[in-house]
Image (cartoon, helix red, strand yellow):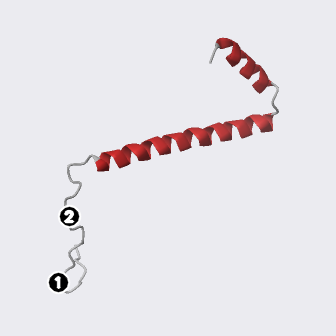
Amino acid sequence: MSNLSVKMLLKEIDNLSQEEKIQLIYYLTRQIENQYLTTESKKLVEFFQNSPLVGVDIDLERQRDIDNRQVEF
């Protein structure tokens, strides 16, 4: 973005009402958050896809107590 277009953008923002500025901030915040979440989720998926544990059969079932009693400390 050139400096001229930034100056024009700022001039247009100055013409907005306070309510419109608040709406713009909320909109831009949501856009940034959505972009961050999408980027992070893709990285997480790539992490698990490239994990050395891909294809390994791991039993994640929790072992129950013999008689289901709760342990008191």
Give me the residue at 82% from left, 33% from top: 17
Spot occupied by residue 1 in the image (x, y as percentages of width and height): 62, 18
Disc 1 versus disc 2: nearer the observer: 2
Q: Quadrant of residue 4?
A: top right
Query: As displayed, is residue 49 above or below residue 12?
Result: below
Q: How many numbered markers are drawn?
A: 2
Q: What's the distance in space between the residues labelled 1 and 2, CA to CA?
A: 22 Å
From the viewer's perspective, tell me whether residue 70 is left or right of residue 37: left
Where residue 66 is drawn, which disc sits there? 1
From the viewer's perspective, tell me whether residue 47 is left or right of residue 42: left
Looking at the rendered structure, the secondary structure element under dot 2 is loop
Give me the residue at 60% from left, 40% from top: 31
The residue indicated by pointer 2 is 58
Q: What amino acid type should be assigned to the residue bearing mark 1?
A: Ile
Spot occupied by residue 62 in the image (x, y as percentages of width and height): 24, 72
Q: Give the farthest residue toward the left.
A: 66
Looking at the rendered structure, the secondary structure element under dot 1 is loop
Question: How dense is the environment of label 1, judged by Cα within 10 Å: few (below 14), some, or many (20 and up)?
Answer: few
Query: As displayed, is residue 40 above or below residue 10?
Result: below
